[in-house]
Image (cartoon, rainbow, N blue to C red):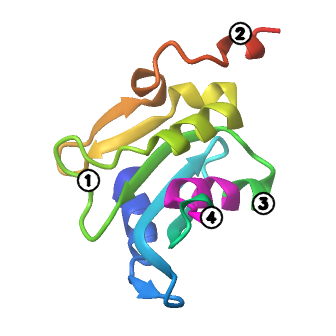
Amino acid sequence: MDIWEEMYLKAKKEYHPEDISPFIQAHHVVAAVQSESGKIFTGFCIESASGVMNLCAERVAALNMYLNTGETKIKRLIAFRKEPPKGNGGMPCGACREFLMQFSYENRNMEILTDYENRKTILLKDIIPNWWGDKRYSK
């Protein structure tokens, strides 16, 4: 079993879409991150009728990592709905991309799995080029 399969299987356990209330859905997008130390943390999305209260699976997984270890550097990320990412899938939304870049300068080099079957990845820095925060990190 490679690291991507391990991450996929851990995240898949979180996939069980449910309505928490008439306003909030959860567990219909799941994610796993691998920290710099090699530990794997999972997360699931929580979406409400008010978009500002939504939490994506990627951010929940990253926050679980931070809460449990204090780490902010992520080596790898996988996110998906019912099936693992295919083609060019599993891409974090803009809010997640921004959060992950702000979480640690090193996260720009995290691998994001976009095709599970072919083990195709992309780096975060390649999907958020010319990021505005580079200058702040250089100080």
Q: Which residue is mark 1?
A: 85
Type of amino acid at the residue the image marks with label 4: Met
Type of amino acid at the residue the image marks with label 3: Leu
Horizontal side of residue 118 vs 135, given as left or right: left
Q: Cα distance, mark 4 to mark 3? A: 20 Å
Q: Which residue is mark 2?
A: 135
Say whether residue 92 is magenta: no
Q: Cα distance, mark 3 to mark 1? A: 27 Å
Instruction: Indicate the quadrant containing the C terminus: top left, top right, bottom left or bottom right.
Output: top right
Residue 67: assigned label:
3
Horizontal side of residue 111 vs 89, given as left or right: right
Q: Secondary structure at mark 4?
A: helix
Horizontal side of residue 98 vs 5, given as left or right: right
Instruction: Indicate the quadrant containing the N terminus: top left, top right, bottom left or bottom right.
Output: bottom left
Horizontal side of residue 69 vs 29, given as left or right: right
Q: As rendered, which of 89 and 131 lies closer to the eye?
A: 131
Considering the whole magenta stretch, tell me its main secondary structure.
Answer: helix
Q: Earlier in the sequence, mark 3 or mark 1?
A: 3
User: Residue 82: x percent and y percent?
Assistant: 27, 71
Answer with the quarter of the image where residue 112 lies: top left
Of the residues tagged 4 and 3, which is closer to the observer? 4
Q: Earlier in the sequence, mark 1 or mark 4?
A: 4
